[in-house]
Amino acid sequence: MIKGSCMCGEVTYAIKGEVGEITHCHCTTCRKAHGSAFSSVAGVQIDDFEFTSGKNQIKCYQSSSDKVRCFCSNCGSHIYAHKEGQKHYILRLGTLDDDPKVRPVNHIWVSLKAPWYDIEADCKLPKHDEWADER
Ligand SMILES: [Zn+2]
Ligand SMILES: [Zn+2]
């Protein structure tokens, strides 16, 4: 079982199967939905996914004609997206509490990437365990 939850903790879920390959999506709707440079996502079979609490808190926004993005209506954490007719959810990995044991394989929709975000430069930035020192 791989577990996840939203920011406020009302929505929790469990995945009994495997999590697919991880993709970083830079499309404009992902950036807007998550308020970030990109969204890290992976496919999970709908049959393998179950809400363990807070299912009634889930609200879905139709971001394109065949796609909904579903999130906790209390805290706004995005949990998954779903494209009409597909048998899998596109899980938003930031809500995972466990390690899915898969790693990112690519970046998609780089043509729509935020101009201030440089994929190549990113891994060379200084890394801090917590906040950067205040000077
Ligand atoms: Zn929540
Ligand atoms: Zn996207």
Image (tube, rainbow, N blue to C red):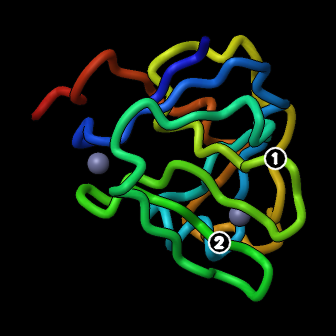
Q: Residues within 10 Å of mark 2 (few under 14, many from 20)?
A: some
Outermost residue toward the left? Answer: 135
Instruction: Write down the quadrant of residue 73 in the picture.
Output: bottom left
Residue pictured at 79% horizontal, 20% vertical: 18
- Which of these two is toward me, 17 or 90? 17
Which amino acid lies under the numbered mark 1 shown in the image of this protein?
His
What is the CA distance from the residue labelled 1 to the residue labelled 2? 13 Å
Q: Quadrant of ligand 2?
A: bottom right
Residue pictured at 58% horizontal, 37% vertical: 93
Label 1 element class: strand
Residue pictured at 75% horizontal, 42% vertical: 46
Q: Quadrant of the N terminus?
A: top right
Q: Which numbered circle lies on residue 99?
A: none
Residue 79: percent from left, percent from top: 52, 48
Up the image or down, 27 lies above or below 89; here it is below
Up the image or down, 116 lies above or below 66; here it is above
Instruction: Write down the quadrant of residue 7 in the picture.
Output: top left
Instruction: Write down the quadrant of residue 9 in the picture.
Output: top left
Q: Is residue 133 left or right of residue 89?
A: left
Label 2 element class: strand
Tell me if label 1 and label 2 are in contact, CB under 8 Å: no
- Which of these two is toward me, 101 or 35? 101
Q: Which numbered circle lies on residue 88?
A: 1
Q: Which numbered circle lies on residue 68?
A: 2
Q: Is residue 58 left or right of residue 19?
A: left
Which amino acid lies under the numbered mark 2 shown in the image of this protein?
Val
Q: Quadrant of the C terminus?
A: top left
Residue 87: percent from left, percent from top: 87, 50
Residue pictured at 79% horizontal, 80% vertical: 66
- Which of these two is toward me, 116 or 18? 18
Up the image or down, 123 lies above or below 27; here it is above
